[in-house]
Image: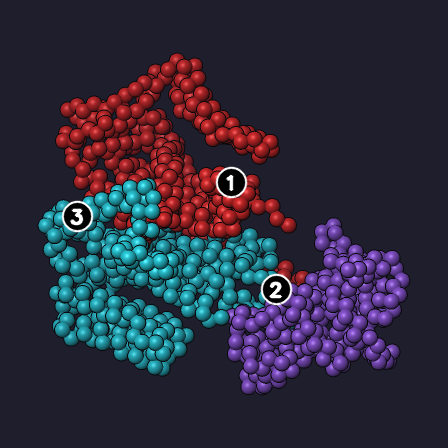
């Protein structure tokens, strides 16, 4: 369970959040959230369901809008400025719980659509990138199939490849294995682990404790819209400081 | 701090402002279009020396309406105005639409159940019925009913009564309870009785749901309805009497008489709409998961209890919205009355428009009338929908 | 059926077993079977008696040209034939491209038979002995070429070209006089109205649906009001209003009655189409849009590349249903006096030479309407199957 700690102290900041608040009507989903992710860092966000962790990660590429506070991604502040939002989305890839592959496009078309339409890449070049990525996630033979013909694990690997095709600097994972059958979780986690060692900045919302221990540089614990605890995996699991974290750990590890 | 940062964003890059601008531009374009339309229409009217006013409604109408004036809206063409004649037409529209809805539902549900019958022949027959009716225009069907079937019947002088009912090319005449002319109108009593019946039904179904005791809410409702009808009948001093059609020298008198146009329109609309309702019924019943039947049977419910308590309530929930659409279509299709000369609201308005030279206004009124009818039906369907919606997280 | 095969009873044939199971399983079913049989026998019997001994079918061939093309001038009939042959060719291409690698499917045969049948009962102008085989040949030529060389998408665009071509050929003056649109009639006019309605209402309907589901409240409200007002009004009233308002709107000039009817049917159909498309748009999981935006696609790209292709595919059956309804609704222009199939039929009925032939006439046009509507709905079922196997 020990991994060589990366020295991130000198690395530039990838994601910076200061005093972020978000409301749905009168319900406050995020309460004064402040945090920092360094470039190349792998952060795992955990917490009970409804704790705001997914909301927070979706705020980072403006799928949700925060009301007050500052979010700066790769040096660009997330404001109402269209140019900033576009710039951030180009740098941030996202993988969803329910895959969200485009069912009317083939696997390869799913991967090449953004490079071709957003980066204006030639078709041949985009397909080369796409095939390389499919190779990387281990399913090049599925390129011409439709998502509906693939297993859940394969679909999620395509979704990862699709996000990587835009060559993002940061990858966000929103519970990537929660919708998968148990036997398929490993194949997706393997791809994510490989990704984690490649030096890309990653922020994962997940319940996979094994994965968190193995690859995370840091764990952030969310509850009721707040950051309760930040620690290295070893510290967090062996020595949680807050009562809420202790309770949460006892609930998920207790059986 | 945040707001200061935002302030430096030029408006053409600010998502919020862009959204607002898009909407304002759209609104301005629409308003300009409407203004253009109104302006052009005004100019056009001026050219033709017309003006868009509804004053003519107060003028005496002066034309006869074939039906709907005896029982429905009392109307005298020599003194009553256009405004009143519209109501005669509206009464005729409502008469055919409401009767049509009830009969189309009954026929449609029967055919729909026939489609699912375990009897192969019945299933096929229902399928042919549905396919023929759905794949030919309703107007052609109306023509067939009117010109071929109804007008093809024998003349009234040669018609043979069946159980006192005369069916001839001058329509239908049947024994009926007839309103005595000098007595209070019995119709409101019927409305009140139906409402009370519905209330009783709602009360006892609710009771059944709360206490779990088997209560025949349907029977109680029918009993209450009949009771109110009967009490009302005697309380008003027996305003109805039995009347049977009698053939005289100039056609039939007495009983309930229905014009050939009404008969053709009603049959046409009922038969056409029933084919759609049949498909809705079939889809509704099929939509109920097979597991539901199995679960109900496993709990020990009998066949009719399963149908009544488990299948029908769930099928109804699926059926009601499209059924509402069909009621709407039936009401709108009743405007085809124009083609066979039944005096519905559109027909009457058309005559009024031609006679007064105010076509623009009369069709405008027609549009409004149908909108009100449509929205009323839509509102009732929505009301039912929200009352029976599945509660889910 | 499986069960019946596994347990063969010595003397019972498969038919007997089938009948036992499907017709006489219970006493009630036996009664129903008997009643249905009686009903069928009675209908078939009376229909046959009427059709073979009483009906005066001569009215149909005598008026066939009127029913097909209305008052279209006979010396200009080459225009209709040109369009018919081009349409036959395109239809062949269409079925051919759809039947890649498959044997000859039945639609070309059916069309060829129909064309030949029409020819048999008419004696209108021009040497039919050349034109009819040309049209039939065009269907098969199109089929084989389409099957060998064309993609369905290419043919879809060809249809739009054919449509424009047909409108020009049917009206424009090429030096020897054109044809007025008021001389279009019969089935030809029914077809033109239906095609114009479907083609023109599609973009409008999709735009209205997008507007109604828009996140911008003002746009959504305006589109909703428009859709609901049109849907709440009967088509007949829409036609009347179009007849009166369109000329006023466009400056009171003398505007073609057909054009006004086309505007009416387009607006009406668009409102219904919008509701169907809205169903497709709302059935799309929100994750699809989120994924597209997260990838950096713009709003327009998301709409065109992700949302619409899926939403439209989901509502294909509803759209075809809408097309059939529109095809049937063209009969309502009878009310405003355009000479399409139903109107022509009524005028023949009122012709003193053909008094008392309404049965024959209405039977014939019902069959015509039925063939086209039924063809559309079974075409839709095929299309649905093809779309489903795609994934």
Mark closer to the observer (3, 2) = 3
Q: Which chain is cyan?
A: C
Label 3 belongs to which residue? Answer: C45
User: Can you tell which quarter of the image residue A237 is in?
Assistant: bottom right
Q: Which labelled disc corresponds to residue A45?
A: none
Q: Marks 2 and 1, how far apart in space? A: 42 Å
What is the chain letter for disc 3?
C
Q: Colour of chain B?
A: red
Residue B135 position in % (x across, y down): 31, 54
> In the shown orientation, is residue C122 left or right of residue B302?
left
Q: Marks 1 and 3, how far apart in space? A: 46 Å
Secondary element at image label 1: loop
Q: Residues within 10 Å of mark 3 (few under 14, many from 20)?
A: few
- The residue under the point 18% across, 74% down is C133
Q: Which chain is purple?
A: A
> In the shown orientation, is residue B143 left or right of residue C241?
left
Label 1 belongs to which residue? Answer: B301
Q: Which labelled disc corresponds to residue C287?
A: 2
- The residue under the point 46% across, 57% down is C276
Does residue B277 appear in this view?
A: yes
What is the chain letter for disc 1?
B
- The residue under the point 33% across, 78% down is C146
Mark closer to the observer (2, 1) = 1
What is the chain letter for disc 2?
C
> In the shown orientation, is residue C365 left or right of residue B131?
left
Residue C268 position in % (x across, y down): 41, 54
């Amino acid at each position: 369970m020990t991994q060589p700690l990366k020295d991130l102290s000198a690395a530039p900041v990838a994601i910076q959040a200061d005093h972020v608040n978000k409301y749905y009507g009168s319900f406050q989903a995020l309460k004064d959230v402040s945090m920092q992710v360094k470039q190349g860092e792998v952060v795992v966000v955990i917490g009970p369901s409804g704790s705001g962790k997914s909301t927070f990660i979706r705020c980072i590429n403006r799928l949700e809008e925060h009301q007050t506070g500052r979010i700066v991604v790769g040096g660009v502040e997330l404001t109402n400025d269209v140019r900033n939002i576009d710039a951030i989305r180009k740098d941030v890839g996202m993988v969803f719980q329910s895959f969200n592959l485009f069912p009317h496009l083939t696997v390869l078309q799913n991967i090449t659509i953004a490079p071709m339409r957003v980066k204006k890449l030639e078709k041949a070049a985009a397909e080369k990138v796409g095939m390389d990525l499919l190779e990387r996630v281990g399913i090049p033979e599925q390129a011409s199939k439709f998502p509906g013909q693939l297993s859940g694990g394969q679909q999620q690997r395509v979704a990862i490849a699709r996000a990587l095709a835009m060559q993002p600097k940061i990858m966000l994972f929103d519970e990537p294995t929660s919708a998968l059958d148990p036997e398929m979780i490993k194949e997706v986690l393997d791809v994510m682990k490989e990704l984690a060692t490649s030096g890309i900045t990653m922020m994962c919302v997940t319940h996979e404790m094994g994965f968190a221990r193995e690859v995370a540089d840091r764990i952030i614990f969310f509850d009721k819209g707040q950051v309760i605890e930040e620690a290295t995996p070893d510290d967090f699991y062996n020595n949680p400081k807050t009562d809420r974290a202790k309770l949460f750990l006892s609930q998920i590890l207790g059986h | 701090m945040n707001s200061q940062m935002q302030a430096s964003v030029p408006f053409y890059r600010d998502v919020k402002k862009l959204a607002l601008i898009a909407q304002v531009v759209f609104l301005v374009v629409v308003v300009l279009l409407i203004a253009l339309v109104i302006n052009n229409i005004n100019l056009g009217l001026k050219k033709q020396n017309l003006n868009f006013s509804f004053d003519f409604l107060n003028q005496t109408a002066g034309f006869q309406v074939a039906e709907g004036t005896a029982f429905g809206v009392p109307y005298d063409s020599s003194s009553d105005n256009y405004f009143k004649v519209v109501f005669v037409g509206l009464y005729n529209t409502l008469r055919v639409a409401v009767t049509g809805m009830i009969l189309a539902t009954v026929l449609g549900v029967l055919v729909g159940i026939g489609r699912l019958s375990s009897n192969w022949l019945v299933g096929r027959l229902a399928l042919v019925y549905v396919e023929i009716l759905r794949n030919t225009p309703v107007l052609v069907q109306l023509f067939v009913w009117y010109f071929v079937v109804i007008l093809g019947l024998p003349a009234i002088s040669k018609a043979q009564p069946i159980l006192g009912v005369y069916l001839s090319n001058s329509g239908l005449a049947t024994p009926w309870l007839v309103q005595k002319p000098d007595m209070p109108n019995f119709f409101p009593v019927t409305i009140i009785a139906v409402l009370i019946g519905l209330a009783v039904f709602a009360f006892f179904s609710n009771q059944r749901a709360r206490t779990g005791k088997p209560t025949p809410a349907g029977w109680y409702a029918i009993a209450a309805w009949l009771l109110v009808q009967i009490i009302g009948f005697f309380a008003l001093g027996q305003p109805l009497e039995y009347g049977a059609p009698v053939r005289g020298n100039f056609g039939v008198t007495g009983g309930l008489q229905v014009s050939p146009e009404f008969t053709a329109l009603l049959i046409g609309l009922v038969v056409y709409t029933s084919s759609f309702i049949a498909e809705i019924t079939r889809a509704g019943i099929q939509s109920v998961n097979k597991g539901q039947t199995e679960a109900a049977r496993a709990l020990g419910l009998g066949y009719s209890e399963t149908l009544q308590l488990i299948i029908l309530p769930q099928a109804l929930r699926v059926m009601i919205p499209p059924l509402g659409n069909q009621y709407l279509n039936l009401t709108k299709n009743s405007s085809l009355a124009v083609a066979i000369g039944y005096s519905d609201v559109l027909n009457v308005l058309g005559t009024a428009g031609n006679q007064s030279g105010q076509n623009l206004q009369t069709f405008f009124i027609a549009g409004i009338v149908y909108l009100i009818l449509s929205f009323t039906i839509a509102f009732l369907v929505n009301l039912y929908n929200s009352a029976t919606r599945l509660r889910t997280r | 059926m499986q069960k019946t095969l596994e347990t063969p009873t010595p003397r019972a044939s498969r038919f007997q077993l089938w009948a036992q199971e499907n017709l006489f399983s219970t006493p009630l079913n036996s009664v129903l079977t008997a009643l249905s049989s009686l009903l069928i026998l009675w209908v078939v019997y009376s229909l046959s008696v009427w059709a073979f001994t009483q009906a005066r079918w001569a009215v149909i061939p005598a008026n066939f040209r009127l029913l097909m093309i209305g008052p279209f001038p006979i010396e200009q009939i080459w225009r209709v034939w040109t369009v018919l042959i081009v349409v036959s060719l395109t239809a062949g291409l269409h079925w051919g491209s759809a039947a890649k690698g498959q044997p000859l499917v039945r639609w070309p045969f059916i069309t060829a038979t129909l064309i030949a049948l029409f020819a048999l009962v008419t004696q209108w102008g021009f040497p039919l002995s050349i034109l009819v085989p040309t049209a039939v040949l065009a269907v098969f030529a199109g089929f084989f070429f389409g099957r060998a060389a064309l993609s369905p998408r290419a043919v879809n665009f060809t249809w739009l070209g054919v449509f424009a071509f047909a409108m020009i050929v049917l009206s424009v003056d090429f030096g020897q006089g054109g044809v007025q649109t008021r001389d279009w009639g019969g089935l030809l006019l029914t077809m033109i109205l239906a095609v114009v309605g479907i083609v023109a209402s599609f973009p409008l309907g999709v735009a209205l649906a997008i507007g109604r589901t828009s996140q911008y409240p003002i746009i959504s409200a305006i589109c909703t009001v428009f859709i609901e007002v049109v849907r709440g009004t009967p088509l007949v009233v829409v036609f009347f209003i179009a007849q009166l308002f369109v000329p006023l709107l466009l400056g009171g000039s003398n505007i073609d009655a057909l054009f006004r009817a086309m505007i009416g049917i387009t607006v009406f159909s668009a409102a219904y189409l919008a509701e169907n498309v809205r169903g497709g748009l709302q059935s799309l999981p929100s994750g699809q849009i989120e994924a597209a935006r997260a990838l950096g696609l713009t709003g327009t790209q998301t709409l065109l590349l992700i949302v619409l292709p899926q939403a439209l595919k989901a509502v294909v059956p509803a759209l075809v249903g809408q097309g059939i309804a529109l095809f049937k609704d063209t009969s309502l222009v009878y009310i405003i006096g355009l000479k399409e199939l139903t109107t022509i039929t009524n005028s023949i009925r009122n012709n003193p030479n053909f008094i008392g032939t309404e049965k024959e006439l209405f039977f014939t046009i019902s069959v015509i309407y039925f063939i086209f509507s039924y063809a559309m709905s079974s075409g839709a079922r095929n299309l649905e199957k093809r779309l489903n196997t795609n994934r």
